[in-house]
């Protein structure tokens, strides 16, 4: 009975710890703001997969926040002219330079695709644009893949019902578990693609 009681207490403690972590995660996600907006970075990196991300990247690019815009995870049928057609702002987009990456389908691959792109574009600071709910995991992956590059988050608020029909609580719940699992897998040095297969089963 004593062993059973200890097991139950351990399980209860883990549940409380997990629930507290979820509260902290949700609070951070819902209150986070774009950082260092007075700073110009070498490049802006947009992760596709949610509403308003590309538009936000184009807006930052048109405002002169970086000399290069890289969009990772672009669908194979999308071309640059279709990206440019999404811009309806007052400021004209710079004549150069927008690059598209077509090989990423997960957050891990977004970071890897960006790392490969940086081999030809040796930049040292990136402003990462993705959905506010996705930002913690994206930053985790990019800092892991690019430890020597400054990573600045630009979270884009997403409509509560914009993610495969989930409401905001379900969305945050799913993303919290994905982020927690990925952090643990990094700490335990698990195979990144095996971990990514789990965390990306419901998209980004």
Image: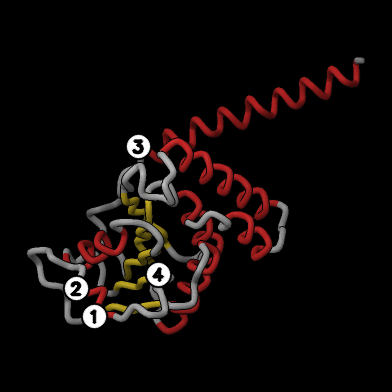
Across and down, in percent, residue 104 comes to: 49, 72
In the visual, does 179 lie left or right of 67? right
Q: For residue 126, which quarter of the picture?
A: bottom left
Mark 3 = which residue? 31
Q: For residue 97, which quarter of the picture?
A: bottom left
Residue at 50% across, 67% down: 111
In the visual, does 107 lie left or right of 27? right
Position of residue 106 relative to residue 177, above or below, is: below
Q: Which mark is residue 124?
A: 4
Q: Which mark is residue 97?
A: none
Element marked by disc 4:
loop
How are the colours assigned in the image? secondary structure
Closest to the observer: 93 or 204? 204
Q: For residue 87, which quarter of the picture?
A: bottom left
Dots 2, 1 in contact, CB < 8 A = yes
Nearest to N terminus: mark 1 or mark 4: 1
In the visual, does 108 lie left or right of 167? right
Mark 1 = which residue? 81
Nearest to N terminus: mark 4 or mark 2: 2
Q: Nearer the viewer, mark 3 or mark 1?
A: 1
Mark 2 = which residue? 85
Nearest to N terminus: mark 3 or mark 1: 3
**What is the CA distance from the residue labelled 2 to the residue labelled 3?**
31 Å
Residue at 39% across, 73% down: 74
Nearest to N terminus: mark 3 or mark 4: 3
Q: Nearer the viewer, mark 4 or mark 2?
A: 2
Across and down, in percent, residue 90 comes to: 7, 64
């Amino acid at each position: 009975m004593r062993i059973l009681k200890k097991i139950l207490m351990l399980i209860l403690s883990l549940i409380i710890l997990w629930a507290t972590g979820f509260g902290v995660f949700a609070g951070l996600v819902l209150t986070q703001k774009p950082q260092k907006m007075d700073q110009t970075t070498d490049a802006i990196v947009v992760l596709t997969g949610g509403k308003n991300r590309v538009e936000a990247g184009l807006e930052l690019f048109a405002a002169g926040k970086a000399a290069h815009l890289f969009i990772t995870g672009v669908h194979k049928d999308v071309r640059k002219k279709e990206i440019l057609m999404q811009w309806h702002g007052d400021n004209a987009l710079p004549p150069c330079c927008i690059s598209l990456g077509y090989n990423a389908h997960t957050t891990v691959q977004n970071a890897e695709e960006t790392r490969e792109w940086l081999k030809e574009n040796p930049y040292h600071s990136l402003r990462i644009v993705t959905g506010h709910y996705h930002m913690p995991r994206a930053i985790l992956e990019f800092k892991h893949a690019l430890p020597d590059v400054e990573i600045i988050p630009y979270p884009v608020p997403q409509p509560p019902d914009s993610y495969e029909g989930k409401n905001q609580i379900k969305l945050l719940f799913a993303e919290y578990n994905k982020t927690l699992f990925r952090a643990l897998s990094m700490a335990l040095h698990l195979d990144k693609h095996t971990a990514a297969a789990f965390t990306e089963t419901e998209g980004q």
